[in-house]
Amino acid sequence: MNIPQDLKYTKTHEWVKIDGSNAKVGITDFAQHEITDIVHVELPEIGRQIKKEQPAAVIESVKSAFDIYTPLSGKIVEINNAVLESPEIVNQSPYENGYLFSIEFADIKELNDLLDADNYKKLI
Amino acid sequence: MEKLLNELSSSGVPSYNVKSDVEIDVQIPRNLKRNSALGLPVAAENDLLRHFTNLSRKNYALSTVFYPLGSCTMKYNPLINERIAKNEAFNFIHPYQPPESIQGILEIMYGLERDLCELSGMDCFSLQQAAGAQGEFAGLLIIAKYFKSIRQTRTKIIVPDSAHGTNPASAAFAGFEIVPLKSESNGSISPEKLKRILTPGVAAIMLTIPNTLGTFEKNIPEISKLAHENGSLLYYDGANLNAVMGIVRPGDMGFDVMHINLHKTFSTPHGGGGPGSGPIGVKAFLEPFLPVPRIEKKKSKFVLNYKKSESIGKLKAFFGNFPVILKAYIYIKALGAKGLKNVSEHAVLNANYMLARFKDKINVPAGGRCMHEFVLSPKSLFKNDVRTLDVAKRLLDYGYYAPTVYFPLIVEEAVMIEPTETESKETLDAFVDILTKIILEETGLEPQKLKEAPVNTSVRRLNEVEAARKPILRWK
């Protein structure tokens, strides 16, 4: 199972990549494997204000539909349109091309609640 | 695979001969007239007959196989009910007939409302909703309207993750914000956790009882007390009512609003997308908000009352799916109070019998006792990258309809089994033997067979991913 060291993680299997005041969010390799083949992705509207742990996106596979929660509060500043067209990218490249959205986070203290790679590994 | 009629079609084989003695003289403007042939497939009558007979033989149905589809209650439907429902007296009525001319129909509907009140402990019922989810939606609109009428702003609905998936969807559709509540390992609710999220803005708590793990919620009195002290209402998802008929009543347990899926509990056939019927029941203080028209009895006459100023309005054209209502009414009258209680007792007994046979071999996350259905989690037994989906496909090779899989979501690699009360011990035993063999033996010895399954069906494993991503929706 691929768990990059430079990312932060949540118990609900999202990953976070900090880039200045923005954070990129996606689902982990473990999550995409459990969800199985993804057939549809819904992403939040750009500009939407969202609170930590609220549902931000929906991922649907042949198995079921899953809410994806935002790990951080803030404003959605960018979404990955490529996965709307080709949802299989999330399966193929969960940490790179298959990210879901970027959020301009509101509270830097929330970063402390995220797991590092080693702790996330213990969780799964 | 059976060919489509269009593929069978060969030009030049005359198959039909439509001659009308009646000359139809309709003035259709020339520019609107069709110039080309109709484009209907052409096949010999015998080929046509074989086509449909062959298709019917490929049916996977309750009349051909055991159908242990968890959460769906695929029980035997007495054929006599179908026969009665086909009676001309019911089939040739028209929705726009004046109520005076359909007194018998209204009497049946009124009678069913009263029977459902008796069974559920609620005060009033409306039969209008087309199915369970529309029932939920109606119930939530009523809750919204009730709080509006007493000038309270409540925007939140608490839904545990062991409830039916339609609950949060219906609440969102009715304009509420969903507050999810994580259930305990057996699907029950911790009153302590509930207290923490039970804020003044909570309009209602929605409970599915028995829940999706097939267990009965132990803390209902406490949950009911907490909800009502907070001024919130309590909603009962009655899709699983077939487990508790004649044993316990939602109305007595403190629920204010509920829905019942007639097409599950009361044996009217279901599956394949309908028809359904989702009556809602409410306590008396919510009656003014029920959908119109209301069926009322004025002296010895039944009338349709549209004049309810606080009603949430109409939810469906005309008045629900009447044949489903009729079949449920016949079922209730045929079985009586004692018979209905028997149905629930046997549904629970059958499920517990199967669970008892599984529980020492396969992980059962909710424990060794259940109501009318139960969930297995065979994940720890899987070898060679076999998954629940493969097990389900393999069951088809043995001539079974596969149980519900990957639901509820709170159980990993879930297999959800509901035998219903209408299956024999022999059928249950045979199914337990096969499923155990697949999970315990075949996953280790013959994983390839599971990955390739099904092989004995008319089509092999379908490409579900491509079908969802790039569906081909028409024949060309």
Image: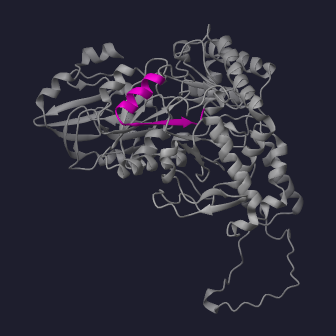
> In which quadrant will I find the C terminus of chain B?
bottom right
**Can you give x and y, in whole percent of width and height, for residue B405 in the image?**
57, 29
Estimate the x, y position of residue B282 in percent, counting from the top left.
Answer: 53, 43
Q: Is residue A113 above or below residue B41?
A: above
Residue A28's place in the image compared with B15, above or below, is above
Q: Nearer the viewer, residue B25 or A117?
A: B25
Task: Say which of B394 and B150 sits in front.
Answer: B150
Q: Is residue A19 above or below residue B111?
A: above
Reply yes or no: does residue B212 show up in magenta.
Answer: no
Q: Which residues are magenta?
A: B221-240
Which residue: 86% across, 53% down?
B50
> In the image, B264: left or right of B465?
right
Residue B232 to residue B350: above or below: below
Q: Quadrant of residue A9?
A: top left
Identify the residue at image location x=79%, y=59%: B90
Choose between B98 and A60: the one closer to the eye.
B98
